Image (tube, grey):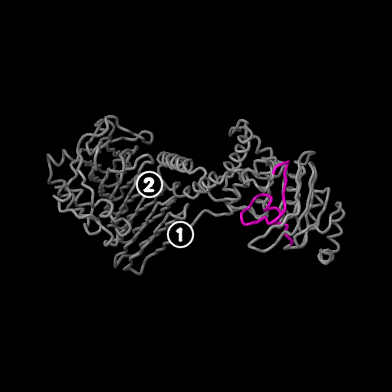
């Protein structure tokens, strides 16, 4: 009996509105997944920005402990397995206080049941971590592997953290299901980067759940240029006055890749702000999905919502479905949203060709230019530079492999 | 250098050029004038290889090559440069990056070493000075937010950097004030030599006071209906195009 059947697990499928483009049942329903908690490559891969504090998970196991010496006083990173062993009630209490709605997020329950490892991070009041914590996922398994990791991050008042999560290895039989829950205290600030690297085919379902206190800030940026199938759910609960959440990202889709980006910003208090700017390019037969939802609760005042989804199709067989959604129960707010799907401009392409660039070069230049402004929004300069480099490399690889394709 | 023979071109199924003949020798400047709708811009676009221009009949030979068989990139690398009537704005592509990449592409195609960033800045600043252009244009997106005159100067700047064998100016004078016009002319005149040729497409005689042509041709109804020396431009300025269109 498979591990999924033992847990009475049902894959979300197209009859769930939020999963209609990403029918996991049709992708994985026939696959006999094994929950993986051992083995994997002997050699860890670590592509990180400078000075990052790397924490590497190989086949679901924590592969290093050297990060411990790099942490400032007031910041602790403990393997989830240790907390589950010594004080499981703390994990239970956190999950109860920060309960994730299973009807919206049907991959969370199975994650909490199966995840034996992850990070339990506690950041004390006013502690500022200068360098990012980089959580790296790797997998190597000779069959279909299901890799569940669960992180709980508690940020006390006025603390500041930067967290990167990246999938750096794994073939297309591997499925990562990761859940990261962050409670961001009053005036605290989180930067979160989520990445699928260009040379991995591993599938990734990633949930980022943010619980935000008064005047707290979250900035999340998602770069997807590798996974065969990726689904990102970012859900911010703006619980107290003045909380701000920004979700930005870029997806570079080629071949038959499928990336689905769903977000929810729940405005539960006055003067809460959400911003979303997401760009996708889709070539070949790739499929991109964007759904950004802002919910503005009744009785709130001065809420500010802005969403923009801009998309570029590079092939007639590629597809993009985009839907910014507003669910508004208040009449005192500022809200706007927009979505565009277009192609490269023929005049711009010809202009570049007439200056001696090939059609492929011209496409590459214009596509990079299309993505440039959203990358500029990443607040941390060294992470921004690192991401710009990764995206540029991914584009070079893409256009080099499409030489001669018209 | 350039031999256009009996060129017939359709745009969206409609005949625009209807048997155009034009021969240009190295070092010559040819002005092509004519009323609106005569096919002037079609000539520039078909020579540079823009899509949507269907050659029905005729040939174009450029330095012994069949120009019409080449892609837009190959034409550019062979030395054909079109200064656009409406230069395209490309937000997000830095002008310096674009200019240097274009120069390096050309150098690479000739098997020459690429120019490094420092040498390129020295080169480009020399050209900017000639055109009285501010350095700030280098840090903006290609033509992004440029005024009409700034865009045209940016076209001439590209021409100065790429040093084509044949420069085609498609109504480069349109929308320019007299100062900008003089700068554009200065850039073109700077490039004039015994090997390099130009086609100057214009509606008005004014530009030809500054870029003095060797020949003037009148294009009407898709053909060259009259050719002459530079004085023909003055005659056209005085009489208009009506009398020639009747002949055509």
Tell me: B6 left or right of A216: right
Q: Chain of mark 1?
A: A
**Residue A161 appears in the rendering:** no
What residue is at 42 percent from the left and 47 percent from the top? Answer: A254
Task: Report whether B221 appears left or right of A404.
Answer: right
Quadrant of residue A321 within the rendered picture: bottom left
Q: Position of residue A334 (x, y in %)?
A: 40, 64
Front residue of this view, candidates B57 and A267 = B57
**Marked residue nearer the N-terminal end (1 or 2):** 2
Image coordinates of residue A155 in percent, x first then y, are 26, 46
Q: Chain of mark 2?
A: A
- In the rendered structure, does residue B50 fall within the stretch colored magenta? yes
Mark 2 lies on a secondary structure that is strand
Q: Residues within 10 Å of mark 1 (few under 14, many from 20)?
A: few
Instruction: Answer with left or right where residue A124 lies relative to residue B184.
Output: left
Extent of the magenta region: B38-65
Q: Nearer the viewer, residue A175 or A256?
A: A256
Q: Quadrant of residue B38?
A: bottom right
Find residue A51 and report its image quarter.
top left
Compared with B145, A81 (above or below) is above
Would you say residue A31 sits in the magenta stretch? Answer: no
**Whole-percent x and y of residue A291?**
35, 58
Q: Is residue B73 visible?
A: yes
**Callout 2 environment at 10 Å: few (<14), some (14 to 19), or many (20+)?**
many
According to the image, label 1 marks what residue? A340
Q: Nearer the viewer, residue B104 or A1?
A: A1
> Is B45 situated above or below A175?
below
Q: Residue at x 83, y 63 (%)?
A: B244
Q: Which mark is residue A224?
A: 2
Residue occupying image coordinates x 58% and y 39%: B101
């Amino acid at each position: 009996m498979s591990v999924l059947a033992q847990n009475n697990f049902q894959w979300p499928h197209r009859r769930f509105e939020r999963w209609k483009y990403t029918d996991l049942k049709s992708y994985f329903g026939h696959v006999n997944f094994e929950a993986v908690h051992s083995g994997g490559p002997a050699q860890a891969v670590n592509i990180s920005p400078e000075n990052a504090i790397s924490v590497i998970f190989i086949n679901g196991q924590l592969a290093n402990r050297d990060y411990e010496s790099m942490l400032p006083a007031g910041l602790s990173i403990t393997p989830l397995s240790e907390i589950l062993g010594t004080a499981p009630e703390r994990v239970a209490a956190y999950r109860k206080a920060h309960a994730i709605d299973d009807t919206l997020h049907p991959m969370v329950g199975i994650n909490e049941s199966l995840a034996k490892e992850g990070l339990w991070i506690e950041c004390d009041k006013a502690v500022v971590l200068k360098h990012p914590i980089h959580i790296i996922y790797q997998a190597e398994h000779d069959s279909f592997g299901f890799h569940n990791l669960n992180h709980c991050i508690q940020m006390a008042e006025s603390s500041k953290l930067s967290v990167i999560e990246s999938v750096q290895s794994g073939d297309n039989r591997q499925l990562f299901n990761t859940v990261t829950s962050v409670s961001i205290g009053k005036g605290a600030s989180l930067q979160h980067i989520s990445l699928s690297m260009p040379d991995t085919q591993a599938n990734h379902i990633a949930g980022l759940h943010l619980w935000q206190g008064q005047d707290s800030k979250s900035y999340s940026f998602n770069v997807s240029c590798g996974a065969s199938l990726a689904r990102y759910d970012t859900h911010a609960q703006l619980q107290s006055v003045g909380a701000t959440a920004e979700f930005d990202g870029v997806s570079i889709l080629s071949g038959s890749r499928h990336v689905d980006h769903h977000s929810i910003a729940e405005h539960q208090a006055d003067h809460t702000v959400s911003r979303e700017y997401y760009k996708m390019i889709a070539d070949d037969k790739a499929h991109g999905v964007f759904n950004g939802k802002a919910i503005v609760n009744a009785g709130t005042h001065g809420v500010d919502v802005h969403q923009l989804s801009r998309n570029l199709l590079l092939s007639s067989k590629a597809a993009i479905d985009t839907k910014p959604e507003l669910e508004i129960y208040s009449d005192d707010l500022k809200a706007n949203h927009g979505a565009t799907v277009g192609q490269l401009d023929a005049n711009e392409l010809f202009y570049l060709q007439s200056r001696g660039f090939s059609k492929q070069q011209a496409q590459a230049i214009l596509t990079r230019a299309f993505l440039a402004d959203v990358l500029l929004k990443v607040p941390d300069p060294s992470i921004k530079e690192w991401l710009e480099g990764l995206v540029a490399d991914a584009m070079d690889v893409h256009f080099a492999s499409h030489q001669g394709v018209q | 250098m350039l031999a256009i023979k009996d060129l017939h071109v359709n745009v969206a199924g409609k005949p625009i050029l209807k048997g155009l003949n034009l021969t240009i020798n190295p070092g010559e400047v040819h002005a092509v004038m004519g009323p609106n709708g005569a096919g002037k811009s079609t000539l520039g676009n078909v020579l540079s290889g823009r899509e949507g221009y269907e050659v029905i009949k005729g040939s174009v030979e450029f330095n012994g090559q069949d120009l019409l068989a080449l892609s837009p990139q190959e034409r550019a690398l062979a030395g054909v440069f079109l200064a656009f009537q409406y230069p395209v704005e490309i937000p997000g592509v830095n002008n310096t990056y674009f200019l240097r990449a274009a120069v390096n592409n050309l150098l690479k195609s000739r098997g020459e070493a690429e120019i490094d960033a420092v040498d390129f800045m020295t080169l480009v600043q020399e050209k900017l000075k000639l055109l009285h252009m501010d350095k700030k244009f280098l840090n903006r997106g290609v033509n992004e937010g440029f005024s009409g005159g700034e865009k045209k100067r940016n076209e001439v700047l590209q021409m100065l950097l790429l040093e084509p064998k044949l420069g085609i100016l498609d109504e480069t004078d349109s929308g320019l004030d007299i100062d900008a016009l003089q700068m554009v002319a200065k850039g073109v005149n700077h490039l004039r030599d015994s090997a390099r040729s130009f086609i100057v497409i214009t509606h008005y005689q004014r530009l030809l006071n500054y870029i003095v042509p060797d020949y003037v041709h009148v294009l009407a109804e898709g053909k060259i209906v009259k050719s002459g020396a530079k004085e023909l431009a003055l005659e056209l300025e005085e009489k208009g195009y009506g009398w020639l269109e009747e002949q055509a």
